[in-house]
Image (cartoon, rainbow, N blue to C red):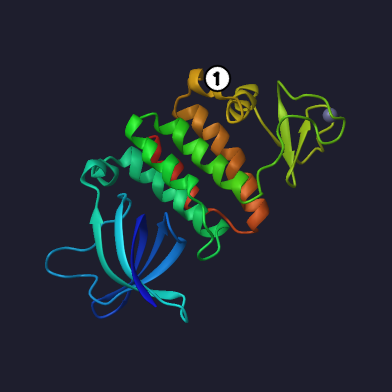
Amino acid sequence: MERVLSEGIIYKISKYADNSAIASAYTYGYGRIKLFMPKAYSSKGGVQTFIPGEIDFLKKDTSELNKFYNFRPDTTYMEYASIPAISLRLSLYFDIFDKFYELEQSDTVIWTILKKYKTSDYSKINLFSIYALMKNTGYMFNFNVCSSCGAKILEQGALNNGLYFCHKCAPENSFFTESYVNTILRAFSNQELYKNIKMNKYDELSVLDLFAYHIENVTGSFLKSYKLFKELIITI
Ligand SMILES: [Zn+2]
């Protein structure tokens, strides 16, 4: 057992009993962790979610539940909680993160990507963060070539059970994409294209539809937060 300080983001706080709560957090040093907060709801207001900062906690060796002491938000990121265009995307991201990462599974790339919301290219960062999450956990499908005939896919593609096909080889019940979705996917592995590609909220949703279909297929569970995300993101 040792008291540690790690950079991270608290993304979920669930009331436990009386004033206490159990929180879920991503930390730079320890990956996904759970925290027990003895006094989560004080008169000074609760702990803030979705803001990068420093988490001070007692790291337990024998239990999955670490004891929370303090969270110091990085004041240069306060807008993460107050701008819905950011907080909605982080909320969706961490719902997916929760499904793919084991406790204490380390991933320091997440930290670098999430700090990029400062640049206000929200759609791009959201898609790239989910793409990187799937790639780093080994669940990203290969979108470059058709998994049946091996042809390079530049126009319409189709996803079926984790395999990507060209439109000629795709089984009937596949999830078919538009050609711009393919261009965006290719940009994830091409720095120059990524830098120059433009996308709006609707392009983002087209790619997210594909990702959500894939995530539900891989995890076997309905991605409830995505339905809500879709409804809310078009209103802001
Ligand atoms: Zn093919």
Query: Image quadrant for the N terminus?
Result: bottom left
Residue positioned 60% across, 25% down in the render: 190
Q: SS class of the residue under badge 1? A: helix
Residue positioned 30% across, 50% down in the render: 51
Question: Which residue is labeled 1 in the image?
Answer: 192
Q: Is residue 9 above or below residue 67?
A: above
Farthest residue toward the right? 149
Q: Is mark 1 within 8 Å of ligand 1?
A: no
Which of the 4 image quadrants contains residue 99?
A: bottom right
Percent from the top left, x then y, of residue 132?
Answer: 55, 42
Farthest residue toward the left? 43
* Side (left or right) of 25 relative to 151: left
Does residue 217 appear anywhere in the picture?
A: yes
Along the viewing direction, whichever of 15 and 1 lies nearer the viewer: 1
Tell me the kind of residue under disc 1: Glu
Which of the 4 image quadrants contains residue 89?
A: top left
Along the viewing direction, whichever of 124 and 118 lies nearer the viewer: 118
Along the viewing direction, whichever of 199 and 224 lies nearer the viewer: 199
Q: Residues within 10 Å of mark 1 (few under 14, many from 20)?
A: few
Percent from the top left, x then y, of residue 23?
Answer: 36, 67
